Image (cartoon, rainbow, N blue to C red):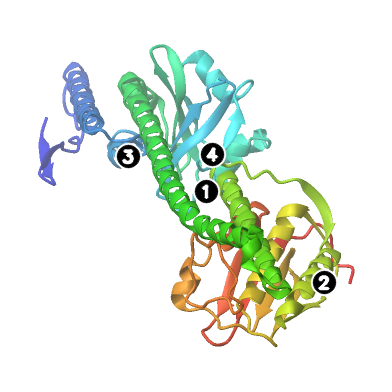
């Protein structure tokens, strides 16, 4: 048996032409037998080398997809194919799930995630017999079984013949390997024999790779959970620091005002008493707002932001909200108006939707100068309502826009009326919008005001 060297590795040379016609009959038959034996030994050597290399990769800790890629790159000299697919038998032993596929052709239509019932299928017959199955004319097979979705998909990929092989580990079926060719009549009994000779070893290799992939996925999940816990711990520490700082000042102010009001010797006139009472009320409202925000953040970060869905007339809801804020804004000399552009229903949590609008409108009023306007508008586009809140305030810098929707965000601009801010409202607003399946954003330039917008899916066509 001769070999050639390719890429630094000895490869079995192509078999020499069989020319024995001039020899006596028995010698000729002996020569053919010896040649077949040599070919078989060459093939077995090639199989052994390929499996040996894949086993080495296993020992190097390769995962399932990497192992299957190695099979695809290495097995061309053993079994003909243009595509290899791999499917797993589900834990319920009732379904087959496509796990991996790779092809030399342009498209893969039967990709990862495709699943089909096992009972009564041709794959169940393969498991029952333990024998690989050859289909050398997939188009004819599909014509006879037009309901076979998997066959229809691989035919659409351009494949015309297939070899389906069961993978069994310790007597338990774990999945299937599918070798497919773009040419018809590519698979013969010898290919079935070849696979059967390597089936046990290949099955163990693939199963080890699958287990390694599952362990790696679990490791990544644990790492993500740990990272989430570290992030929550950091948020918690910032909360504690903020609470200690932001509650201390209003409590001290309330305490001082209360002591003065309670002191009979303070000799306060009605104007002074009214100012102290207003300050107590203002500071108390801020503390309630801060505590509510902290409770909301706790619900969000722990995954407990439950929404109570109901159908809401968005136009009427916006009108009521704008009227309420318009009354409050007049004290600051700011005008809040609604530009109506139709009515429609949305499925939303009324409390959370009000919270979103309250945060956006009050934030616009907070940073707008006296005499300016805040405009609320809404329009229907591509199945979603877009709600805009536009102000004539100082606008946002690039840094402001990058951090605006994060916890504890502080803006370069200051509230025009000396209002307090927890730095949590916009972050909560973003998460509430996302929980409704929408998006939120801002368009702004320094000195040119801001347009805050969010979307919410529409559940009924516009009637306006």
Q: Nearer the viewer, residue 450 or 205?
A: 450
Q: Where is residue 297 in the image (x, y as percent from the top left)?
A: 56, 50
Q: Where is residue 181 in the image (x, y as percent from the top left)?
A: 44, 41
Q: How far apart are marks 2 and 1 (CA)?
A: 60 Å
Binning the other alpha carbons within 10 Å of mark 1 as few (below 14), some (14 to 19) or many (20 upward) gives some
Task: Report the residue at 74% width, 53% height from top.
Answer: 351
Q: How far apart are marks 3 and 2 (CA)?
A: 62 Å
Task: Report the residue at 10% width, 44% height from top.
Answer: 8
Question: Which mark's residue is nearer the viewer, 4 or 1?
Answer: 4
Q: Is residue 455 visible?
A: no
Disc 1 designates what residue?
157
Residue 166 falls in which quadrant of the image? top left
Binning the other alpha carbons within 10 Å of mark 3 as few (below 14), some (14 to 19) or many (20 upward) gives some
Residue 306 falls in which quadrant of the image? top right
Q: Nearer the viewer, residue 263 or 213?
A: 263
Asked whether, in this view, residue 344 is left or right of residue 96, the answer is right
Q: Distance between the residues labelled 2 and 4?
A: 51 Å
């Amino acid at each position: 048996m001769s070999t050639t060297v390719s890429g630094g590795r000895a490869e079995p040379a192509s078999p020499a032409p069989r020319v024995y016609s001039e020899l006596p009959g028995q010698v000729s038959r002996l020569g053919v037998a010896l040649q077949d034996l040599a070919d078989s030994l060459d093939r077995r050597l090639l199989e052994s080398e390929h499996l040996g290399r894949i086993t080495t990769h296993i020992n190097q800790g390769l995962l399932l997809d990497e192992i299957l890629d190695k099979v695809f790159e290495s097995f061309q000299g053993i079994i003909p194919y243009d595509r290899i697919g791999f499917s797993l038998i589900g834990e319920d032993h009732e379904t087959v799930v496509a796990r991996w596929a790779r092809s030399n052709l342009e498209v893969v239509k039967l990709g990862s995630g495709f699943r089909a019932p096992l009972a009564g299928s041709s794959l169940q017959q393969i498991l029952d017999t333990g024998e690989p199955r050859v289909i050398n004319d997939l188009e004819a097979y599909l014509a006879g079984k037009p309901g076979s979705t998997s066959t229809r998909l691989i035919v659409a990929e351009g494949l015309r013949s297939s070899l389906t092989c069961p993978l069994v580990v310790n007597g338990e079926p774990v999945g299937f390997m599918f070798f497919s060719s773009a040419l018809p009549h590519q698979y013969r009994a010898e290919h079935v024999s070849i696979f059967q000779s390597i089936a046990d070893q290949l099955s163990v290799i693939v199963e080890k790779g699958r287990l390694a992939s599952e362990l790696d996925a679990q490791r990544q999940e644990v790492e993500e959970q740990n990272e989430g816990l570290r992030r929550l711990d950091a948020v918690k520490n910032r909360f504690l620091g903020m609470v200690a700082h932001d509650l201390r000042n209003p409590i001290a102010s309330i305490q001082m005002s209360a002591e003065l009001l309670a002191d009979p010797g303070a000799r306060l006139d009605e104007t002074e008493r009214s100012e102290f009472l207003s300050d107590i009320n203002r500071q108390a409202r801020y503390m309630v707002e801060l505590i509510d925000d902290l409770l909301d953040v706790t619900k969000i970060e722990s995954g407990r932001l439950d929404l109570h869905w109901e159908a809401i007339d968005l136009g009427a809801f916006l009108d009521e909200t704008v009227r309420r804020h318009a009354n409050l804004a007049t004290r600051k000399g700011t005008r809040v108006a609604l530009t109506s552009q139709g009515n429609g229903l949305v499925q939303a949590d009324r409390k959370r939707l009000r919270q979103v609008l309250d945060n956006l409108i009050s934030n616009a009023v907070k940073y707008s100068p006296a005499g300016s306007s805040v405009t609320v508008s809404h329009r229907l586009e591509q199945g979603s309502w877009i709600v805009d809140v536009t102000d004539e305030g100082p606008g946002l810098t690039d840094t402001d826009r990058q951090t605006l929707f994060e916890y504890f965000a502080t803006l370069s601009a200051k509230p025009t009326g000396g209002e307090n801010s927890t730095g949590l409202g916009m972050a909560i607003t973003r998460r509430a919008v996302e929980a409704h399946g929408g998006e939120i954003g801002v368009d702004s330039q320094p000195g040119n005001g801001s347009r805050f917008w969010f979307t919410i899916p529409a559940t009924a066509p516009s009637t306006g």
